[in-house]
Amino acid sequence: MTTAEATFRRRPLAALSAAEFTQFRRNKTLVFTALVFPVAMPLGLFLLASRNGATAEAAGATFDMYALFALMFVQFYTVLSMVTTRRGEGVLKRLRTGEAADWQILTAPAMPGVAITVATATVVAAVVYGFGAPAPVNPLLMILGLAAGSVLFALLALATSAFTKNAEAAQITSIPVIALTMVGAGHIRAALPDRASELLGYTPFAAISDLINLGSAGKTAVAGADIPAADFAGSFGEIGQPLATLAVWTVSAIALVYKCFRWDDRG
């Protein structure tokens, strides 16, 4: 048995994740999308909004947009494209005959996106707070929002792959999830009538947006200007609906993956 084979037997998830990261780096389009969109566009917005001084609201809007692009283009679309391609090549079916468990095979394609999200989030935070934005009210909620979002959007990608014939078709099958994600963004909900904004608050990204804005600014993006920002302790009292919404969507996505995911194009 070679050293590589022995390592795979002991740590299959680590070995699979390393292989997926290597494949990811070779796809220049995915690399460009993952590095440019989540960083350049939110920071451009922040710098424009902060010409007269960086505010907590500007920081919250920046992280809101960052999470939107990171979860859509880095986590969701990357996993959808990679899993669909691996299935078409017969890789997923072959991996099931080896040492790795099913959950490890399905988790590995999400790991490059997780690593990139951690790195780019650090860059965005360094710029935002380096330019004088007020310190976040509760950074734990911001981390929770990104972590829970990474899990949920990877699951949504796996579920969507069941209805995606090949990597090119992913451009079409991804549209419903992308549309549902975008309407949950804080700045979009804030511009809508109260009833529509309330209903969209139950979409998956809306819950993530609310957690990130609560953590950054102490209140959600749809809260009125007359509503005071919560402090660290008070911010925990506002997370009931976002957490419940994320839980429902996550459980639903797991059930859909369990029922519909296909390991082989002929299966």
Image (cartoon, rainbow, N blue to C red):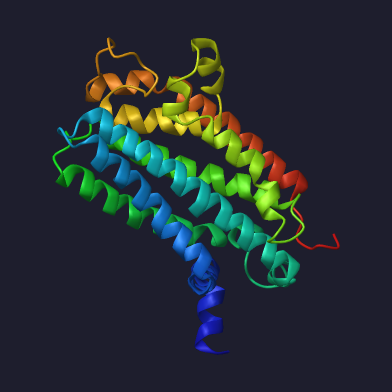
In the depicted structure, whether residue 121 falls above or below residue 223: below
**Quarter holding residue 168:** bottom right
Q: Judge by depth and name the residue closer to the eye, 137 or 35.
A: 35
On the image, the x and y values in percent for residue 79 come to: 58, 56
Instruction: Decide if residue 137 is in sight here.
Output: no
The residue lying at 56 percent from left, 57 percent from top is: 78
The residue lying at 55 percent from left, 22 percent from top is: 200
Q: Left or right: 7 with respect to 62?
A: right
Quadrant into which the N terminus falls: bottom right
In the depicted structure, whether residue 183 falls above or below residue 101: above
On the image, the x and y values in percent for residue 158 come to: 65, 51
In the depicted structure, whether residue 249 falls above or below residue 66: above
In the depicted structure, whether residue 144 falls above or below residue 27: above
On the image, the x and y values in percent for residue 185 come to: 46, 31
Instruction: Decide if residue 118 is in sight here.
Output: yes
**Quarter holding residue 100:** bottom right
Tell me how many marks there are.
0
Of all residues shown, which one is farthest toward the right?
Answer: 266
Of all residues shown, which one is farthest toward the bottom?
Answer: 2
Q: Left or right: 168 with respect to 233?
A: right
On the image, the x and y values in percent for residue 96 come to: 71, 67
Q: Judge by depth and name the residue closer to the eye, 186 or 80.
A: 186
The residue lying at 50 percent from left, 78 percent from top is: 7
Q: Judge by depth and name the residue closer to the eye, 38 or 83.
A: 38
Quadrant into which the C terminus falls: bottom right
